[in-house]
Amino acid sequence: MTKLIPIVVEGKKIVQLNQLTIDQANDLRSWLPPNSIKIFNFQGIEINDCISFETYDYWFKTHHILTRAYETILDF
């Protein structure tokens, strides 16, 4: 799983959920609290499905570690 690079919009680091695979995006959406997905305007372009990079980074670290541990257990 490759970690996303944040986009800086309005001084905030964000990531778009549509940059993830469908499974990862669905997993992250189910983990997020309601109304945490935002829309930003950047140079006249609307950017949908955004969350803070800090939230994504925390999810990535916890999800990635749990996934690797699970895969390691199955390898035996």
Image (spheres, grey):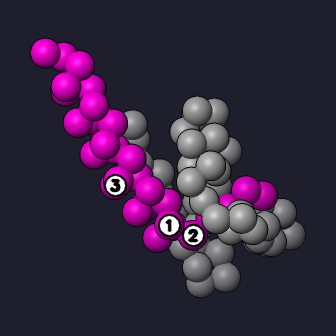
Q: What residue did someone put label 1 on?
A: 55
Is residue 73 rendered to the left or right of residue 49? left
At 19% across and 25% down in the image, what residue appears? 73
Residue 13 position within the rendered picture, expressed as x and y whole percent measured from the top left: 54, 73
Using a 10 Å C-alpha cutoff, classify the residue at mark 2 as few (fewer than 14 neighbours), some (14 to 19) or many (20 or more): some
Span of residues in magenta:
48-76
Using a 10 Å C-alpha cutoff, classify the residue at mark 1 as few (fewer than 14 neighbours), some (14 to 19) or many (20 or more): some
Quadrant in the picture for residue 67: top left
Helix, strand, or loop for circle 3?
helix
At 50% across and 67% down in the image, what residue appears? 55
Query: Answer yes or no: do the residues labelled 2 and 1 have beta carbons within 8 Å?
Result: yes
Q: Is residue 67 in the magenta section?
A: yes
Residue placed most toward the observer, 3 or 33: 33
Q: What residue did someone put label 3 on?
A: 61
Residue 16 position within the rendered picture, expressed as x and y whole percent measured from the top left: 64, 55
Quadrant in the picture for residue 50: bottom right
Residue placed most toward the observer, 62 or 45: 62
Q: What residue did someone put label 2 on?
A: 52
In the rendered view, tell whether residue 74 sits above or below residue 12. Answer: above
CA distance for labels 3 and 2: 14 Å
